[in-house]
Amino acid sequence: MTTFDDREKGFESKYALDQEQEFKAVARRNKLLGLWAAEKMGLNADRAEEYGRAIVKADFEQPGEEDVYRKIAQDLEGAGLTVSEGEIRRKMDELSSVAREQIRNDE
């Protein structure tokens, strides 16, 4: 095996690891976002955990994060809360950073 082949395998391995970590970080972000929204809606601990899992599942409906945003926004509105799009998106960004840091520290 040549140095080029070794380097190529190394890049492929790093790419796969990066993709796996990003997937985990997005799922963690979504759960944290669900817990944040559950707290705003006044859900108890068990229902909050269940809601966090529902938000993780919502992300599989379509590519991107719009399905997650839409579910959170609709659920908050359905609970009679007024939360702006900007506030939800800022929380999503904030929790993305938190989730990535948590994933890095877990591994």
Image (cartoon, rainbow, N blue to C red):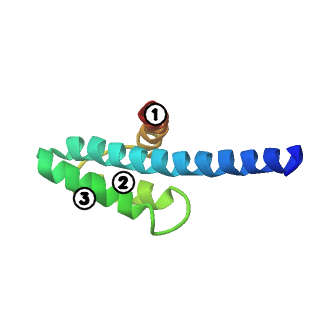
Callout 2: SS: helix
Q: State the residue position of label 3.
A: 78
Q: Is residue 42 above or below residue 59?
A: above
Q: Is residue 37 above or below residue 73?
A: above
What is the x, y in percent for residue 42?
A: 15, 44
Could you tell me the amino acid type at mark 1?
A: Glu
Residue at the location (44% across, 46% down)? Answer: 85
Could you tell me the amino acid type at mark 3?
A: Gly
Q: State the residue position of label 2.
A: 73
Residue at the location (67% across, 44% down)? Answer: 14
Say which label, 3 or 1, has the lower sequence index. Answer: 3
Q: Is residue 25 above or below residue 106?
A: below
Say which label, 2 or 3, has the lower sequence index. Answer: 2
Asked if residue 43 can be seen in this view, the reply is: no
Say which label, 2 or 1, has the lower sequence index. Answer: 2
Most distant residue in the front direction: 1
CA gap, disc 2 and disc 3? 8 Å
